[in-house]
Image (cartoon, helix red, strand yellow):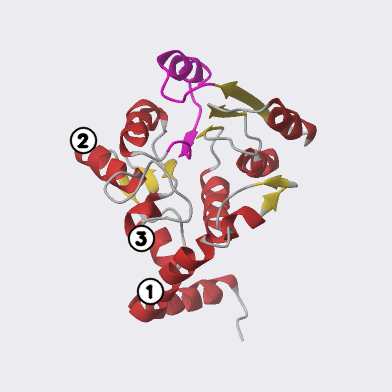
Amino acid sequence: MTFSRSELESEKTEFLKLQTQDKELSQMGLDFVIRSDRCGYIHQWTWCDLPIVQLPQDVLATQEIIFRCKPTVIIETGVAWGGGIALYGTLMDLYGGRRIIGVDLNLAPSVVDSVMEIGLKTEVTLISGSSTNLDIIAQVSSMILEGDRVMVILDSNHTHEHVLDELRAYAPMVSTGQYCIVSDTIVENIPEQSHRPRAWGHGNNPMTAVRQYLSEFDGFRPDEGIDRRLLMSLNPSGYLERYL
């Protein structure tokens, strides 16, 4: 039986070593992601009653990062149904975040209304348009104040070129010690989704964009600790910590 937090953390470290060494378990996690996608598993979950469209494991990893790093500004591309905005806002309300900025090419007025009805204390700005539009990038940048701690989450169009353009535009806004989370890097590791055709696939996806961006800019590194813990994730090697 564990009696203290330090003992618990020590126990977790030993369990993680076992987990990391178990290659069969890792394969089972990947197999689960592949098979469950055919059942729309990631579409089953909500935050504050808004669809979040994420694996629960990635939701937990994201909340850990937010609460540990306490960004004052979070920028998300790809608002979808607003569940992500609700997640960030409820966490930021706890420690006093300043603003969330969401950008989506297909931002529905009903989604805007649903997000605003939550009653978050953290200010939310939702922008309709392409995340790679230069005017929108400038608008987002203008909302960052001196001293802000900025985190970015990229979850819109998942083609290589689009994500690479997003990384070049938004990753430099990330503050040292904060994260740029690139969603759906898993596309590189799974078979073609014939049941759900997309414009992206093997060789043309967020993972390939991350690899190219990291070869161009050395201020980020994938958080390997998170990768080791997440047996199931849509974002392997996509939790990028800015260290410079």
Question: Which residue is under mark 1?
Answer: 27
In front of the other: label 1 or label 3?
Answer: 3
Q: Earlier in the sequence, mark 2 or mark 3?
A: 3
Label annotation for residue 191: 3
Image-based side of 170 in relation to 41, left or right: left
Q: In terms of image quadrants, where is residue 42?
A: bottom right
What is the secondary structure assignment of the residue under circle 1? helix
x 67%, y 47%: residue: 51
Q: Is residue 133 magenta?
A: yes
User: Residue 3: image x %, image y %?
Assistant: 62, 80
Q: Amino acid at mark 1?
A: Gln
Q: Amino acid at mark 3?
A: Pro
User: What is the quadrant of the N terminus in the image?
Assistant: bottom right
The 10 Å Cα crowd at callout 2, few under 14, some 14 to 19, many 20 or more, is few
Question: Which residue is under mark 2?
Answer: 216
Distance of label 2 from label 3 (alpha carbons) = 28 Å
x 60%, y 75%: residue: 4
In front of the other: label 2 or label 3?
Answer: 3
